[in-house]
Image (cartoon, grey):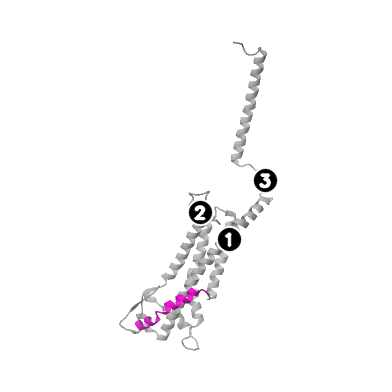
Amino acid sequence: MVRGEFDEYPDEVNMHCTARMAEMLDEYSKELQSKFHKEITADKFLMDEIRVLLETRGIGLPNFLPKSAFLTLLQKNVKEVSETPFVFVEKLQSSTKRAAQNLMSLIKNKSADRVKEIVEMEKVVDYTCNPDYMSTLNSLMGHQENFTKVLNDMSESKIGLPIFGDIEVGHLREYPSVVVQQAFDMKMRCTAYWKIVLLRLVDSLALHLVFSVHNLVSRDMEVEIVKDLMNPHNGGVERMLEESPKVTIRREKLNRSIKLLKVSKEEVSKIMDRISADGGPAQV
């Protein structure tokens, strides 16, 4: 569960815990990514951003993106994937319960609380010092000029953009140019930041689970065993001193053999006594 050793179970893949956990984390990451990309459709490009921008307008300087708009979109995205980490924790619990069933429910509850905390943090705080955010954002914003050019060309109806593929632009001409440009800016910021959020959701949960399993094996399991043994109601020490069924069967078998040997010895002694009483063995 910690070092990835499986010498005792070479053919039981379900007991190769670290490998199975890595596979499950990969699946979890792919599922999060797929949920995000499902929301991107060619004919609805920028519509969420435009709707939010129009509903968060206030009195202020032009061309300034309201922070509330970004947080609204971020919270929507987080909410759409918020159940996925909990489902992952449920799957992990069922896959590893054979190794430490008494403690898995505790780890499950702690993991669920940790997942809830991670999700809530992502809803409230928009922050990263990861340089990939600015790198991705600058790369995406590099297509804004071409996007504007196609938008203003009435003969064009589509444009190809990285990540999004071919998208429709005709429906965007119904809105003010300033709002559309702000929506494009917002979309690119959200896309660049969401990449960081998904990585954090996977990395944070992975670190938490590995740390929890490490504690389970090196500390919690020992404490649980001692508690179970010393519990006067469970008869822990007495149970520890009890023979296993295999040992009991072997002991009984040995006792029968010893008894049979004693009987045999006695019979042989009787025969030897009779021989001696008859004057010893006949001479040839």
Q: Magenta segment, which residues?
A: 129-151
Helix, strand or loop at mark 2:
loop
Q: Which comes sooner in the sequence, label 2 or label 3?
A: 2
Between the C-alphas of marks 2 and 3, the distance is 33 Å
Q: Which residue is mark 2?
A: 16
Residue 273's spot in the image, x, y percent? 67, 17
Q: Which comes sooner in the sequence, label 1 or label 3?
A: 1
Total tally of numbered discs in the picture: 3
Three-letter amino acid code of the residue under disc 3: Glu
Q: Which mark is residue 212?
A: 1
Residue 127's spot in the image, x, y percent? 53, 76
Q: Residues within 10 Å of mark 1 (few under 14, many from 20)?
A: some
Residue 152 left/right relative to 36: left
Three-letter amino acid code of the residue under disc 2: His
The stretch drawn in magenta includes residue 136: yes
- Asked whether the beta carbons under mark 1 and mark 2 sit within 8 Å of each other, the answer is no
- Asked whether the beta carbons under mark 1 and mark 3 sit within 8 Å of each other, the answer is no
Residue 200's spot in the image, x, y percent? 51, 69
The stretch drawn in magenta includes residue 189: no
265, above or below 184, in the image? above
Between the C-alphas of marks 1 and 3, the distance is 31 Å
Q: Residue furthest front?
A: 284
Rendering quarter of residue 188 = bottom left
Q: Residues within 10 Å of mark 3 (few under 14, many from 20)?
A: few
Q: Which residue is mark 3?
A: 238
Residue at (52%, 60%) from the top-left corner? 90
Residue 50 in view, yes or no? no
Most common SS among magenta residues: helix
Helix, strand or loop at mark 1:
helix
